[in-house]
Image: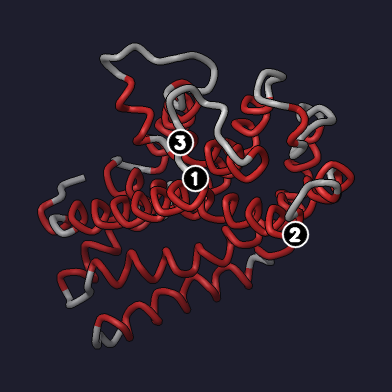
Amino acid sequence: MEYASRVKQIGIYYGKRDREYKNSKGVVKTVLYTFFVSLFLLLICGSKLFKSEAGGADGSSYRYLMLICICIFYGLFNSIETVCNEREIIKHEHRSGMYISSYILGNLFFDFNICLIHATVTWAVVTVRFFTNIIGEEWFLIKIVGYWVTMLLVTFASDAMGLMVSSVVKNAYMAMKVMPFVLILQVGFAGIFMALPDLVSWISSLTLSKWGVMAINDIVFGSNYIPGDNDPFFTCWMALLLMTVVFIAISIIILQSVDKDER
């Protein structure tokens, strides 16, 4: 590879992923896979999703948590093996002049396309299924767009988190071992199922699941149904974007020492 500026290298790694994805008919596989997962989601959503009259007491937040966790799974699954599968290649190319930031951003920008497919297909399935609940709501068009943006931001942030985990672990086997643990943390520490003890309550603010559920709740009800949390959806979106930036920064920092890595 001819090493050039950081921007050009981003394009090189983006193009590499794009060719691999197209050669494997990735678009068709991604659409079908997401569609069937979304259908499975409908089995556990009940009939009152996105209906503000449902209130918070009927378990709406639990259903939104399932929706958000599926988006988190999409993002993690996209990227959690990306870096660890190519660690030796990264080491060699970094010594030859590759910028770590270009490698990470090239993969991230391409992954955005996959996240867009995941979020859009899932959003389309649940919106069609619960359209009768949504259409009767005030500002229903804005709400529909809000659901899509929330799912996209959660999926993309999860993809960035997957890149971070992939930069830390030793190999793909370890990455897949870690992924269930990460998902469990997202569910358990979201603060949805139960109030967390004061000692660990701060961890909730570090989970994508909490911000995703809070955003959906605020869009549906106009206020959150998580005790003590009343941030509007726009604040939740900003939190998701900030966490995405942090995950990418950590990935780049960790991989800067890849030359010394003996794994």
What residue did someone put label 2 on? 141
Residue at 40%, 35% in the rendered image: 207
- Left or right of 132? Residue 90 is left
- Left or right of 130? Residue 107 is left
Residue 182 visible somewhere in the drawing: yes
Residue at 25%, 57% in the rendered image: 249
Q: Compared to 6, does 213 lie above or below?
A: above
Disc 3 from disc 2: Cα separation: 39 Å
Foreground residue, 215 or 170?
A: 215
- In the rendered image, residue 61, in percent from the top left (x then y), is placed at 62, 28
Residue type (three-letter) at the residue carrying disc 2 = Leu
Residue farthest along the left direction in this orientation = 260
Foreground residue, 202 or 81?
A: 202
Looking at the image, tell me whether mark 1 or mark 2 is earlier in sequence order.
2
Secondary structure beneath disc 2? Answer: helix
Q: Compared to 194, does 151 lie above or below?
A: below
What residue did someone put label 1 on? 232
Residue type (three-letter) at the residue carrying disc 1 = Pro
The mark total stands at: 3
Identify the colour scheme used.
secondary structure
Secondary structure beneath disc 1? Answer: loop
Disc 3 from disc 1: Cα separation: 34 Å
Corner quadrant of residue 105: bottom left
Q: In which quarter of the image is the C terminus?
A: top left
For disc 3, the neighbor class at 10 Å (few under 14, some 14 to 19, many from 20) is some
Foreground residue, 30 or 232?
A: 232
Point out which mark residue 176 bears.
Answer: 3
Residue at 57%, 58% in the rendered image: 115
- Left or right of 31? Residue 208 is left
Corner quadrant of residue 182: top left
Residue type (three-letter) at the residue carrying disc 3 = Met
Look at discs 3 and 1 and give the one toward the viewer. 1
